Amino acid sequence: MTEAKTKKAVIYCRVSSTKQTTHGNGLDSQETRCREYARYRGHEVVEVFSDDISGSVEGRPGMKAMLKYLQARRNSKIVVIIDDISRLARGLEAHIRLRSALASAGAILESPSIEFGEDTDSQLVENLLASVSQHQRQKNGEQTKNRMRSRMLNGYWVFQAPQGYRFERQSGGGKRLVRDEPLASIIKEGLEGFASGRFSSQGEVKHFFESQPLFPTCRHGVVLHERVNQLLNQVLFAGHIEYPKWDVPLRKAQHEGLISLETYERIQDRLQVKPYAPARKDIDADFPLRGFVACGDCNEAMTACWSKGRSSHYPYYICRQRGCPSEKKSVARAKIEDGLRDLVRALTPSHALFELASQIFRDLWDAKLGASKDEKTHLRIEIGNIEKSVTQLLERVMEAESTTVIKAYESKIEALERKKLILLEKIEKCGKPARDYQSSFQTALKFLSNPWNLWETGRIEDRRAMMKLVFGGRITFDRKSGFQTPNISFPFKMLAGLSSPEKAMVRPTGFEPVAPRLGI
């Protein structure tokens, strides 16, 4: 031993992350080296403090606990042992402030790697080493960022996997996103439902996710609006990657998308539009037509309520529009829903008409597949035109001097590049349907054959979906005459057109190729 009197000492150890604690022995090896040094110097180790956080952070839990311990024993002149100067801090300013805090607590700093002194030469060496440690931290961060950015440029996501995906190690090295079922399919249905109009607002997407038992919720048992918005704005679900913060433009990713890029762009367009028949807090299974049915006098949406009678409560729809002749005049829910049932069933096609429509859809499907070669050629020509436009805009950017003009050109170029990616995706999928005709149209044809079946499920999601699929907007109800002639959606307009005698045999593909197959 080099000193006659034994001093009390504490050991401070630090690693940069929790992972180094669970998947390594950094803290143990530091403590072992510090204890060996304490035995050599004749110090008695009374406490060990540790952190698993970056050295650039001053307010570390372990460091705070140690300073509190030392301040309570300021007069004891306790020795603080660190394995290396970089364990105290990885920045010069943080190092100086912590050294000052240790000094004010009456502590003495020691290390097996460096001898701390109070003379100017020793302080110069200490500060130089702290500066070198700071440079190493900054350099490591810069190199890590560059490697991560390069990997992103190659189409790999390098941050936490989003909901619906998980990381899987691939044979060539590194990790790649893969679908995490069944969550991936649930998110896919929600995104495609919003893009297609099945869900008219983010609120309805939220309700859909909450209706899925396997979709994760917050501690209150709900899906936050912020989470829904993040999912709708996540381009990773489209099989592409983008990170403007690191100057990584939109590009094809290495993982499989849940939706197409075209669907993603459609979602972005819909997010900018005020939703039709928005989901409200007071929309529930009792009044599924709230927001869909309009008053026959003022054409404003009717609201709904329960009215208390002598022995029970009764459901009503009611107009609350000021100045309307029907203001505060209620209509029984059963009267409106019975009228709706008659209206929808009147749109239900006959069996023969439905078979004809089904055959038309099949012919259109076959024609679409047969035209895939011509479609690819057209798409390639369109891509060529986009590339010419981009080249011209780049030349203008080089010549422009105004910052505003340059930003406008860059915005235009970005929009063209996104359009080009969508076209490339279409070329890749052209002539390769994800599913066969029966799988693709089975649900749609089943709905067209009897749309009222969707209402009779009793689920509010199905009932509101039926309203959106059958009608092209709000339907007007007059208290005296019932429902007015509604604006119906295109499929039912087409069926109505086919039902007239003079149009029943008119075919989009012509008579001669189709008539022999139908026996006409």
Image: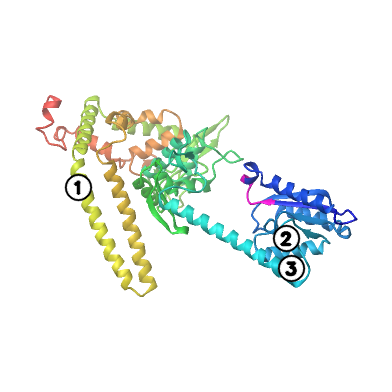
Residue 377 got which mark?
1
Give the mark nearest the N terminus, 3 or 1: 3
**Magenta highlight on residue 501:** no
Left or right: 302 with respect to 408?
right
Closer-to-camera residue (113/340): 113
- Which residue is at 28% across, 43% downward? 428
Label 1 or label 2, whichever lies nearer to me, is: 2
- Magenta highlight range: 14-19
Q: Amino acid at mark 1?
A: Thr
- Callout 2 crowding tier (Cα within 10 Å): few <14, some 14–19, many ≥20: some
Provide the secondary structure element on which disc 3 rests.
helix
Where residue 449 appears, as percent x and y from the top left, is 30, 28
- Callout 3 crowding tier (Cα within 10 Å): few <14, some 14–19, many ≥20: some
Where residue 171 appears, as percent x and y from the top left, is 44, 38
Q: Amino acid at mark 3?
A: Ser
Return the residue found at the far bottom.
Answer: 401
